[in-house]
Amino acid sequence: MDTGKDALYQQRIPIYPRSVKGRFRNFKWVVLGLAYGVYFLLPWLRWQRSVGPDQAVLFDIAARKFYIFNLVAHAQDLFWLAGLMIIAALLLFFVTGIAGRVFCGYFCFQTLWTDVYLFIERLVQGDRVARIRLDKSPWNTNKLLRKIATHVLWLVVAFWTGLTFTLYWGDAPRLLVKWFTGSAPFAAYATTLFLTATTYVMAGLAREQVCTYMCPYARFQAAMFDADTRIVAYDVARGEGAQGRHKITRELKTREQRRQQGAGDCIDCGFCVQVCPTGIDIRDGLQVQCISCALCIDACDTIMDTLGWERGLIRYTSEKASEGKKSPVWKPKTIAYGLALLIAIAGLMWSVSSQAPIEVAVIQVRQPLFVRLSDGRVQNSYELHLENKTNEPVDVALMIHGLAGAELDVGRFEAVTLAPQRSLHVLARVRCRSNHSEKGSRSFFLDVIPQKRKDIGMISVSATFYMPGARR
Amino acid sequence: MNQTKGKTGGAVQTTGHAWDGDIQEFNNPLPSWWLWSFYATVVFAVVYWIFFPAWPVANSYTKGVMNNITFVDSEGHKKTMHWNTRALLIKELQEGKTAVLSREYMDKVAAAGYSEILGDPEMMAFTRSVAKGLFGDNCAPCHGTGGAGVIGLFPNLADDSWLWGGSVKNIETTISDGRLGFMPAFGDVLSEAQIADTASYVLSLSGQTVDAAASARGKAVFQTNVGGCHYCHTPAGTGLKSQGAANLTDQIWSIIDVNGAADPAAKKALVEQVIAKGVERRMPSWSKRLTPTQIKLLTVYVHELGGGQ
């Protein structure tokens, strides 16, 4: 190993975050509870459907159908996912512009899982001081058992995380049984074990290094910051006073004494540093490692409450507000982000609510492009892809319009019935008289008319008829 | 990180040897991650030898343990053998999810009659998707991917003219037994004038502009034993399907490109050529190469190409 100055690898400095109680910690527990509740229980939620699986959320790759409660997204609806991504991006811009790295601090799965892993660590090895002592102590049975127990529990959480993700892609109860009896598809094992490994490594071993070194969001969120963005900040003026921060001593006990001697309100207890999951000192100002989890606010508030001084030495504030200037939340940038976000949400909701009940695609048979018939007419053929996205069978009639004198032939069917949530391919032949003036291609419409279903209107799809011109 | 001389100013260890007095060798050990990966591949290889076919031994090889694959061979016997990709493929083709699903449909189509298949949109969709592959493998080399054929060589299957009949029964016979299309050459039997007159008459049958007098003379050749054309092409010129004789009254020409000819003289010349030289075309029999179900699927597919009869 290179110990020179040009080392590219920096050894991780272990961080032992101390536990803290407070409003933000409580909020984080609530978010964690909700997120875990949704993530781990959703695959088990059953749902009544007339057609399809009885699982509320199921992504069926093989059948190219994505069941999300009462919504069934088909392969053609995949662009909704793009819409969702756009909304997520705009939401990130919007929220980050107003309140900084809210996502990082409260909602990011790296933060949530690290929180759980820290909780396990604390449960088995004790709080900060106990953990430091344990790490420094020589290896003995107690240390070994505690370390093993921690890692085993971490692996259990990691495994259940990976397995739960897998359960979204198949019928959860059956897939679970198959998984443990060795008859699940390879992809199920690969996905589960891969996510087990990544969860264990990211939340257990890498932790804050993921945010500091790996995560692109952590870096580009800074681009959305401005002087009005709410950040977790230390009130330097109040904390440092004229002479800087100072521990509580006999001479510097009350605020009056401290004021007189020029000491600030910060008693340099170090609690805010000890609770920080990324191991920074917020008193040094805004730093790239800060994920805005606000645990240092809880820590400082606890101390201030004990001392009987007002809270807020560390608080959510903006650069401008901390300088005593006006710092509005709503400004052209945030309003523009907000509007864009609303438009994207409205667009997606409109798109989802107006999902076509029947999807029709017409693919022209191009080999041969046209065929001359014995009576001198010309025939073009079309492959019709019909997909019924409703939960009831739909009878459809097929017709054409816009091509004078043309005749449609779909074969010997009396009716074309589209089974619920199924698709059907039908070969349609169109025959048309040919004369020289009509040579070239002409547009016409293939009409799919649902029978006995007034709620679904006629679907007309434009198609092209190739006319080779009259015979010489 | 590895150390090199340039980076750390010559602080690298040497192996301790010196050749020719001053030639020394730097000791730059491989990175440990690399070494461990290497050891891991060695371990993997040893495990692989145990479980998979690996080592050649005389004229055989080690088969590996606990890796048997059981499948049904082409004779219907259950066969178990050691792991190999061929057996794996056969098994997958027999027991794979899609294989099972498509067999279910295949059995349904195999048991159904033609009118049943033609009247059921779902069975039709399945038939067309499977038969498209069969057609591409077996028929397309001559008839073209879309069945459009080649004028003079292979009939167009996508139009509505059927030399041997367009019913499913006729098409099935054509595919399974093959066909021999034959028209004798009249070049040595009829005079040039007679051939020219007959050509005029033939063209008139499908509404082409011809010399009326020549056409009348040709009619006499066509309808009597002078030419004897009516035996196969029928007095009306619509052609006997049992002989594969072309319908001369419609707009379809499968031997010569009358529609593409520049002027009436050229059209006539083309027809004269056919009368003088005759035609012989052969479609091979497929009954020994394709299963009855495959022929059934192809029959429906070809029937649907042009709309069938």
Image (spheres, rainbow, N blue to C red):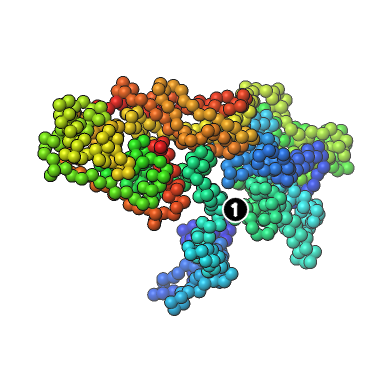
Which residue is at the far front? Answer: B225
The spot of residue A410 in percent (x, y) is: 47, 33
The spot of residue A201 in percent (x, y) is: 65, 53
User: Which residue sits at x=61%, y=34%?
Assistant: A393
Quarter that holds the C terminus of chain B:
top left
Quarter that holds the N terminus of chain B:
bottom right
> In this rendering, does residue A61 appear at all?
yes
Image: A374 above or below A156: above
> In this rendering, does residue A284 appear at all?
no
B38 or A332: nearer the eye?
A: B38
Q: Specify whether A439 is left or right of A50.
A: left
Q: Specify whether A438 is left or right of B86.
A: left
User: Which residue sits at x=42%, y=30%?
Assistant: A430
User: Which residue sits at x=63%, y=55%?
Assistant: A184
Which residue is at the far bottom? Answer: B58
The spot of residue A470 in percent (x, y) is: 29, 26
Q: Chain of mark 1?
A: A
Mark 1: secondary structure: helix
User: Which residue sits at x=54%, y=27%?
Assistant: A449
Q: Specify whether B228 is left or right of B18.
A: left
The quarter of the picture where residue A183 lies is bottom right
The tally of labels here is 1
Image: A45 above or below B53: above
Identify which amino acid the numbered label 1 is placed on. Answer: Ala
The spot of residue A81 in percent (x, y) is: 59, 36
Few, some or many residues within 10 Å of mark 1 (<14, 14–19, 20+): few
A213 or A11: nearer the eye?
A: A213
Look at mark 1 in the image and give the residue it sits on: A187
A349 or B140: nearer the eye?
A: B140
